[in-house]
Image: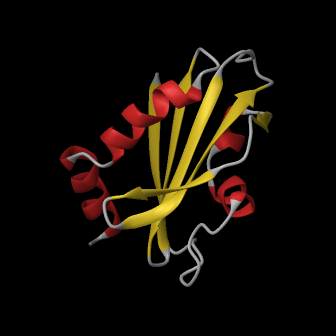
Amino acid sequence: MTLYLRAKIGLCNCTTGIADDYDLDRMGDTFLLGEVSPSGPGHPVSIAWMKGRSRAYKITSRGLSGKTILSVVYNERCDMIAATAVFGHDRPKTIEPSVMDFLSSSTAMRWAEVTLGL
C-alpha cells in the first residue's frame, strides 16, 4: 500500500466540512491517479478531533487498472487533509482500519498540526 497525504489550506467549507460523497469526490485527490469509479457509498470518519468521510474507488485507467483507492478527507475549520491510499486488491474494508490508525497516530497528527499551523 502507498499512502499519500496532502494539505489543502482554505479549500474546505468552513461550516459543513466534508458533508457528503459529493464533497469527498470533489475535495479528494483521486483524480491525480486517473479515471476512477466509486466502489460504493462513503461514510463519516473521525481522525482525532477532526471529522470527514472515507470512500473506496476502483482505478480504471493509466495502467493502474485493478488497483483500489481509499480516499479519506477530513478537516479542521476551513483547512483539510486529503489522504489517498493505493493498493493492489479489491478489499478496502481490510485496509481502512490500518489507514485510519496511521492517520490518527502521533506521527501523522504532528504532520497535520505543523502543516495546518495548529
Q: Nearer the viewer, residue 96 or 63?
A: 96
Q: Percent position (x, y) of residue 21? A: 71, 57
Vertical position of residue 85 compared to residue 111: above or below: above
Is residue 75 left or right of 21 when viewed as pictured? left
Q: Is residue 91 left or right of residue 66?
A: left
Q: Quadrant of the C terminus?
A: bottom left
Above or below, comparing residue 37 to residue 118 in the picture: above
Q: Is residue 20 above or below residue 90?
A: below
How did the renderer colour the structure? Answer: secondary structure
Residue toward you, 59 or 89: 89
Horizontal side of residue 19 vs 118, given as left or right: right
Residue 74 pos. (x, y %): 48, 60
Residue 55, by quadrant, is top right
**Residue furthest bottom in the image:** 15
In this rendered view, identify the residue nearer to me: 86 or 117. Answer: 86
Residue 9 at least partly seen: no
Please report the residue visible at 29 percent of the width from the left and 71 percent of the height from the top: 117
Q: From where the camera sits, is residue 70 visible? A: yes
Task: Decide if residue 9 is on the left or right side of residue 98.
Answer: right
The picture quadrant where one finds residue 12 is: bottom right
Residue, x 59% and y 66% (percent of image)? 18
Give x and y (percent) for residue 3: 45, 33
